[in-house]
Amino acid sequence: MIVINSAAYVVPEFRNELGAIPPCLLPLGNQKLLQHQVNVLRSFEGERIIVTLPSSYDLTLDERDLLEALQVEVVAVPDGFTLGEALTYVLNIAANGEHGLRLLHGDTLILDLPDKLDTVAVGHSRGDYEWELESPGEGQAVDALVWSGFFAFSSQREFLRALALSRGNFVKAVRLYGRSLSLTAASCEEWFDLGHVNTYFSSRSKITTQRSFNALKISEGVLYKTGVPHEKIEAEERWFKTVPLAVKKYTPHLLDAGTQSDGGRFYALEYLPYLPLNELFVHGRNSVDFWVQKFVLLKKFFVDCRQACLLERSVQDDVQRDAVSLYEEKTLARLRNYEQQTGFSIDTVITQHQGKPLTVAQIAKICVRRALSMSVVPAVLHGDLCFSNILFDSRSERLKVIDPRGLNFKGDFSIHGDQKYDLAKLAHSVIGLYDFIIAGRYAIDLDADGFECIRFEIDQRLASVQEVFLDVSFIDRAPVREVMPLVVLLFLSMLPLHDDRPERQKAMLLNAVRLFKEFI
């Protein structure tokens, strides 16, 4: 039997950014920490995994689906219980006589878990926190060995007895158990403590998610980025260098850039230990008011990008041509690529709307026509303004943007473009729920007409956030609802980029259909 102890809420310093959530539900690499924990704990084959949560925490439908998919049992523990009291409660109602007991703290991830029973995992201390020293009485020495949050006992009964004798004091109970059944300290090198803000962001920097076309390395407060094609990396570097001060204040400092020994390009930015908006949106429990404030900050970003754009007529013409290329040529080229990859014809009927069959080609044609009928809004263009590229600094209440495009559709360097494209990218996170797809938080069902459709289990809080977003005037001449055809085109144009994940491609396609039927 394995118990993940997560029966209390995260410490107050986290709640300003994520709301009140249990520690095992902290975001990590666009997943919940629990997903990483369960993945490692599955190495103990055949053992039940129980996760404790505060009884006052209401799981969303989406979180219930996730827990079911992970095949973990949930025990709701009364609020206010100490760790020892929570474990006593769980063992009394959930234990069924299995041999052994493994405990993992809910704010801890250990990739090299010890496999033997009667073991305490230890690691080298990182920071000035009150971890339990493996050798009491030696003082809090720098780099001392401390308990790292995983315990394995051969006797559930003996541990429960130790909890009773220690009156629910977890540390005393472990020490008391060790006097009856000797405990061995097992050193763990891949231990990540996520229970404090400092250690959380330090751990995040070491567990960095990345796509195949780029590589990130974080070292001593510097983020190094390389990748292919080299022109893309150079364009991003030049964008950071070139944007006006009114926009540069929204970016990390560019520290270095150049050519590597293999001829590839790199650039180095200051590493900002902030959470991206996609993880707050998908995994946080932030209020609607929290998101209203973020949308106010984003509206100011849009205003600053427009005001920083003083273009000559020839450059405005270039922006117009680039918009046509983005909305029409790019979409059609990407759809042809998708057909070649998968053998799926875009002339296939994919849904029915108001009694009429619809193909992907028809959906694309209608959305392209709508997109091209709107006026261009010249601005300094980020080019990929989705939630994962927007960081939030909760202390200064400021946003920072990363991973700009820097190239127009023809492959020429440019910091300018049609701002409706940035708004569409933003909408594809908020309304299109792109980050839910990337996180695997969706289901595919059949609609009333027998066609496949995508379903998201978002709660009323997020639905309210979406409603507020739709009413924000980011661009005076382009309400969010009017750029939704661009959002549909974004999902269609992304299809060939995810050829390594066919199930994700299907989700993107069905999501384009969903948005078309709802908004277009």
Image (spheres, helix red, strand yellow):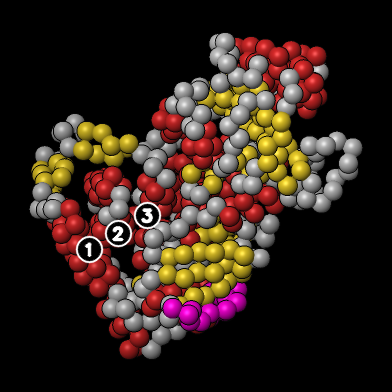
At horizontal 65% and vertical 33% (from top left) the residue drawn is 150
- What amino acid is at disc 2? Leu
Disc 2 crowd rating (10 Å Cα; few below 14, some 14-19, many 20+) is few
Where is residue 450? Give x, y as percent.
16, 33
Label 1 or label 2, whichever comes before in sequence order: 1
Indicate which label's residue lies in the foreground, 3 or 1. 1
Q: Secondary structure at mark 2?
A: helix
Relative side of 353 to 88, left or right: left
Part of the protein shown in magenta = 244-262
Mark sitting on residue 428: 3
At horizontal 64% and vertical 11% (from top left) the residue drawn is 92
Which quarter shows the N terminus? top right
At horizontal 24% and vertical 39% (from top left) the residue drawn is 453
Q: Are marks 1 and 2 in contact (CB under 8 Å)?
A: yes
- When the figure is inspected, residue 87 is found, relative to residue 445, above or below; the finding is above
Q: Which residue is mark 2?
A: 497
Label 3 or label 1, whichever comes before in sequence order: 1
Mark sitting on residue 334: 1
Quadrant in the rendering for residue 250: bottom right
Quadrant in the rendering for residue 413: bottom left
- When the figure is inspected, residue 234 is found, relative to residue 130, above or below; the finding is below
Where is residue 184? Give x, y as percent.
71, 31
Label 2 or label 3, whichever comes before in sequence order: 3
Was residue 264 drawn as part of the magenta stretch in this picture?
no
- What amino acid is at disc 1? Arg
- What amino acid is at disc 3? His
